[in-house]
């Protein structure tokens, strides 16, 4: 088993869950094709990294919102209001979409801003992220 590949999966998945663009699914598929580690370990490393990356977004939202009145604050007030209204309408279950590109990361940030309790946040996000990597693994198995 290649521990460095598992760390690579963890880091790429962590970065992919942040505001930085990254593709952890391709890393997982490549590692699976080379059979670097047991499948369960690769899915676990990617899921854990991606979940903790989303937790970082939650923390940023939770504590960064205190600076919303500053001119350098990156989120416009009307965008924040729209996100808050959307999250208010669909609630914590919208976190099941945290795996999606483009919308997933902002959902996790807004959950922090709106003070979603961390235990429910982490449980729902972990399920969504893990299911995504399981689906990626199943699709990859069809081609390897």
Image (cartoon, rainbow, N blue to C red):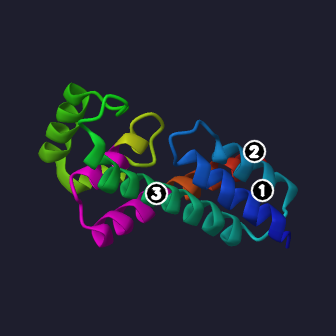
Task: State the image coordinates of residue 34 (x, y, percent, origin top left).
Answer: 87, 55
Q: Residue at x 48, y 57 (%)?
A: 129
In the visual, does 42 lie left or right of 75? Answer: right
Q: Main secondary structure of the magenta part?
A: helix
Q: Quadrant of residue 45?
A: bottom right
Q: State the count of labels.
A: 3
Can you identify the residue that label 1 sits on? 32
Which residue is more in the foreground, 55 or 124?
55
In this view, 44 is above or below 112: below
* Circles 3, 2 touching at the beta carbon (< 8 Å): no
Q: Residue at x 65, y 46 (%)?
A: 25
The numbered mark, 3 or 2, whose residue comes first in the sequence reads 3
Q: Which range of residues does the magenta coloring cover?
A: 107-130
Element under disc 2: helix
Element under disc 3: helix
Task: State the image coordinates of residue 81 (x, y, percent, origin top left).
Answer: 17, 34
Q: Is residue 62 magenta?
A: no
Which residue is more in the foreground, 142 or 118?
118
Can you identify the residue that label 3 sits on? 56
In the visual, does 124 lie left or right of 13? Answer: left
**Between tags 1 and 2, which lies in front?**
1
Can you identify the residue that label 2 sits on? 143
């Amino acid at each position: 088993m290649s521990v460095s590949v598992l760390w690579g999966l963890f880091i790429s998945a962590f970065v992919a869950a942040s505001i930085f663009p990254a593709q952890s699914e391709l890393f997982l598929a490549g590692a699976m094709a080379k059979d670097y580690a047991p499948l369960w370990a690769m899915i676990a490393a990617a899921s854990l990294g991606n979940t903790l990356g989303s937790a970082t977004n939650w923390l940023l939202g939770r504590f960064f919102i205190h600076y919303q009145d500053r001119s350098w604050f990156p989120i416009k007030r009307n965008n924040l209001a729209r996100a808050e209204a959307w999250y208010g309408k669909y609630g914590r279950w919208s976190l099941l979409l945290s795996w999606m590109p483009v919308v997933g990361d902002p959902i996790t940030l807004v959950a922090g801003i709106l003070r979603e309790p961390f235990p429910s946040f982490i449980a729902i996000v972990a399920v969504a992220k893990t299911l995504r990597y399981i689906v990626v693994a199943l699709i990859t198995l069809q081609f390897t």
